[in-house]
Amino acid sequence: MAQTGLFLGFVLGVVLLALTVFLTGRGWRHYSVTSVPTPTGGGSAGSGSGSGSDSRRWADDPTVLSLVFVLAALGFGAMAVLFVGGSAIPESVTNVAGPALVAGTLGVVVAYLFYGTYHAARGHGLARSQAALLGSWVLGLLFVVGVALRLVGLL
């Protein structure tokens, strides 16, 4: 039963990877923007040069983003297999894999919330410092809700 589930997960992962490679290889993201908004954060659009522009180019490349996503998914999958592994895996590895999996998931959620809020605020015309403040405020609110739930006994 477990082997069937693992095999099905592997096949679906291969299909997802093939679909990702197919979609990123077609060049569907190459379009031209008619109006470029001017930055409001105190710098000009062309002020970045050197490694900053290289890293921005890498960050905007859908192939790199897809590769990072696949590697992260494989890492989380490996940690989950180590966590729920049978008697063949030592108990010390299983004891480390559980907290590492929880910490990784919390890290991804926190980064997603902060960057999503930051990016949305920048898209609505706020400066970088204001957008960072808004992202930090959302994370602080999430922390306060977590503490309140813990005090009530729901967590």
Image: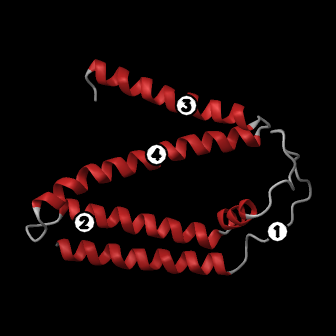
Kindly indicate the quadrant of the structure image that contains residue 93.
bottom left
Eyeballing the image, is 99 above or below 22?
above
Q: Inspect the image, locate mark 4, and give the three-letter code of the amino acid beneath it.
A: Val
Q: Earlier in the sequence, mark 2 or mark 4?
A: 2
Marks 2/4: CA distance? Answer: 21 Å
Q: Which mark's residue is nearer the viewer, 3 or 1?
A: 3
In three-dimensional space, the C-alpha distance between marks 3 and 4, rounded to whole angstroms, equals 12 Å
Picture disc at residue 14: none
- Residue type (three-letter) at the residue carrying disc 2: Val
Whether pointer 2 and pointer 1 mark residues with C-beta atoms closer than 8 Å, the reply is: no
Q: Residue furthest front?
A: 50
- Mark 2 or 1, nearer chain start: 1
Q: Which residue is mark 2?
A: 81
Q: Tell me the CA gap for discs 2 and 1.
A: 41 Å
**Dot 1 corresponds to which residue?**
31
Of the residues under marks 3 and 4, which one precedes in the sequence? Answer: 4
Mark 3 and mark 1 lie on one chain; the one further toward the N terminus is 1
Image height of 134 relative to 107, above or below: above
Callout 4: few (<14), some (14-19), or many (20+) C-alpha neighbours within 10 Å?
Answer: few
Label 4 to label 1, Cα distance in Å? Answer: 30 Å
* Farthest residue, direction right: 34
- Residue where numbered disc 3 is placed: 138
Question: Residue 121 in the image: x percent, y percent?
Answer: 70, 37
Secondary structure beneath disc 1?
loop
Q: How is the image coloured?
A: secondary structure
Label 4–label 1 contact, CB within 8 A? no
What is the three-letter code of the residue carrying label 3?
Answer: Val
